[in-house]
């Protein structure tokens, strides 16, 4: 398979030499751990229940490892040393030998089988990725065979999101309270809503990490996280809002860095309800908003104007022409659709006191009012919002999302098919295009098909796609080797503290 240039590299903290720190700081750093205050603290360690949550994936990837890991648009070995297709619907993975879990049990193919079955049984947000899989079997102690109902070009993307747990334990509620894995760290302490402490795994099969412990602290308020970073209470944080970026950049002894990410914001229209069953209405509401200005005003350096229904670093994302701000065209389309004076409707989103979606919603609502469309805001408690979202009990829906696999299929193939029933939209041509893309084993063909699919979603204005977000890290002087991938998963395996 021909390698492609990496569209979105990891954010890698530049190496800092020991000379950058004084002798006192070096002594303090010797042997100490890393303290992290993530923007979103993990609600659980259960990766089966929360397989697409970066806040859960980030810490858990230090403890459990997948068969393969994503590197740009390609995949590299992790717990699998190699893989092949014996035919179009059969994949064979060779499991790495002489690897043990942190409790001393040897890794075998059966661990992979039971981990896959547990995730499939959980039926969480990644369930659609596993639907084409007919069986996962252990051919021998170090060989796993995956058979699918059809050719599956997304197999490696799916496998990159399957952390391997211990057979006989994985999938149980008790296991996820203190999961045991093959990774470079073990769970030392898990206090939900308070802290998570990871300790270096002495049995790790790979290069031993430099940092002995990683402590994740739950500090929900951004201002408190910034203060903790400035005083040295924490070493690393992320998720800095646009209004606070300049403040963080000005902190003494603190570095702030960003890179393109897989997260984005969107407004969906419920196409099963009038007037949103008419694409002219949907397009009109997009033309009615100066999206470029809104994104600039609200997000500054933390986001860019979207050019597709998936962010630009994603495999298969095209660079489409954004809808321009055109009030006259919006009014014309509304009139053609039978709404010359506009109409009244509602928009829901999951709200909290500090969510930036409150500001985005109000900005859009103000623009829509100028063309006669009166939108009643419906901020909802998250569980209520999610229940209504899944039941299609809404007119317009505002939310964010992350393309966890970095592959366009994760979003386009999971959310926009007729069978998905996510926003009342059904386009048979789109279905055929997405089915062909999922089944193709040719990366170039898949890119072409996903670009066609994205164009269909864009032109039909299935939703409004305003912004692609960056991923970021803010960290203290004397730290190097930190990474965050485009999905927002932070890794501290290669972290070093200046001595």
Image (tube, grey):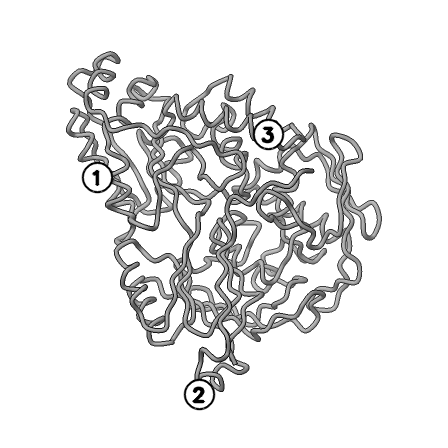
Which is nearer the eye, 463 or 189? 463
Does residue 120 appear anywhere in the picture?
A: no
Label 2, label 3: how many angstroms apart (C-alpha)?
Answer: 55 Å
Task: Identify the mark nearer the N-term, 2 or 3.
Answer: 2
Label 3, label 1: how many angstroms apart (C-alpha)?
Answer: 37 Å
**Label 1 vs label 2, nearer the camera:** 2
Q: Position of residue 335 (x, y in %)?
A: 21, 14
**Label 3 vs label 1, nearer the camera:** 3
Q: Position of residue 278 (x, y in %)?
A: 33, 17
> Badge 1 is on which residue?
363
Label placed on residue 63: none
Near mark 2 (Cα within 10 A), the count class, few <14, some 14-19 or many ≥20, is few
Task: Identify the mark nearer the N-term, 3 or 1.
Answer: 1
Query: What secondary structure is marked by label 3?
Result: helix
Reply above or below: 160 against 277: below
Q: At 36% across and 24% down in the image, what residue appears?
A: 461
Report which quarter residue 274 is drawn in. Answer: top left
Q: Position of residue 5 (x, y in %)?
A: 57, 43
Label placed on residue 446: 3
Q: Quadrant of the N terminus?
A: top right
Judged left or right of residue 94, residue 220 is left
Near mark 3 (Cα within 10 A), the count class, few <14, some 14-19 or many ≥20, is many
Task: Identify the mark nearer the N-term, 1 or 2.
Answer: 2
Q: At 61% across and 42% down in the image, what residue appears?
A: 157
> Badge 2 is on which residue?
24
């Amino acid at each position: 398979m021909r390698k492609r240039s990496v569209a979105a590299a990891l954010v890698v903290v530049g190496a800092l030499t020991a000379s950058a720190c004084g002798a006192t700081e070096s002594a303090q750093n010797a042997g100490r751990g890393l303290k992290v205050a993530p923007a979103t603290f993990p609600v659980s360690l259960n990766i089966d229940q929360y397989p697409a949550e970066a806040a859960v994936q980030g810490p858990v990837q230090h403890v459990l490892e997948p068969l393969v890991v994503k590197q740009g648009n390609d995949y590299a070995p992790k717990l699998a040393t190699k893989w092949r297709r014996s035919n179009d619907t059969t994949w064979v993975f060779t499991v790495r030998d002489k690897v043990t879990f942190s409790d001393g049990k040897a890794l075998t193919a059966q661990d992979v089988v039971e981990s896959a079955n547990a995730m499939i049984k959980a039926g969480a947000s990644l369930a659609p990725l596993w639907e084409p899989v007919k069986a996962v079997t252990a051919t021998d102690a170090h060989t796993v065979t995956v058979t699918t109902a059809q050719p599956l070009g997304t197999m490696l993307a799916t496998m990159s999101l399957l952390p391997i747990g211990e057979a006989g334990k994985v999938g149980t509620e008790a296991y996820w309270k203190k999961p045991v894995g093959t990774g470079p760290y073990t769970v030392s302490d898990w206090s939900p809503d308070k802290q998570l402490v990871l300790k270096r795994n002495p049995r790790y099969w790979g290069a031993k990490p430099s940092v002995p412990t990683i402590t994740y602290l739950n500090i929900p308020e951004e201002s408190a996280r910034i203060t903790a970073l400035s005083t040295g209470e924490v070493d690393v944080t992320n998720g800095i809002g646009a209004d606070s970026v300049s403040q963080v950049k000005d902190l003494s002894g603190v570095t702030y860095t960003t890179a393109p990410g897989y997260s984005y914001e969107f407004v969906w229209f419920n196409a099963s309800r009038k007037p949103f069953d008419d694409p002219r209405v949907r397009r009109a509401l997009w033309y009615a908003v100066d999206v470029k200005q809104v994104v600039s005003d609200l997000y500054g350096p933390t986001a860019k104007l979207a050019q597709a229904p998936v962010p630009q670093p994603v495999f298969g994302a095209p660079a489409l022409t954004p809808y321009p701000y055109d009030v006259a065209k919006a009014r014309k389309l509304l009139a053609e659709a039978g709404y010359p004076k506009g109409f009244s409707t509602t928009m829901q989103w999951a709200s909290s006191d500090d969510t930036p979606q409150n500001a985005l919603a109000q900005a859009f609502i103000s623009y829509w009012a100028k063309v006669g469309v009166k939108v009643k805001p419906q901020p909802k408690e998250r569980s209520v919002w999610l229940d209504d979202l899944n039941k299609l009990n809404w007119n317009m829906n505002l939310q964010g999302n992350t393309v966890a696999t970095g592959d366009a299929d994760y979003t386009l193939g999971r959310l926009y098919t007729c069978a998905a029933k996510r926003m009342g939209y059904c386009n048979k041509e789109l279905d055929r295009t997405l089915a062909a893309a999922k089944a193709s084993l040719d990366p170039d063909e898949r890119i072409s098909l996903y670009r066609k699919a994205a164009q269909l979603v864009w032109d039909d204005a299935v939703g409004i796609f305003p912004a692609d977000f960056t991923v970021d890290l803010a960290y203290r002087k004397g730290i190097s080797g930190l990474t965050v991938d485009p999905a927002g998963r932070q890794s501290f395996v290669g972290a070093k503290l200046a001595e």
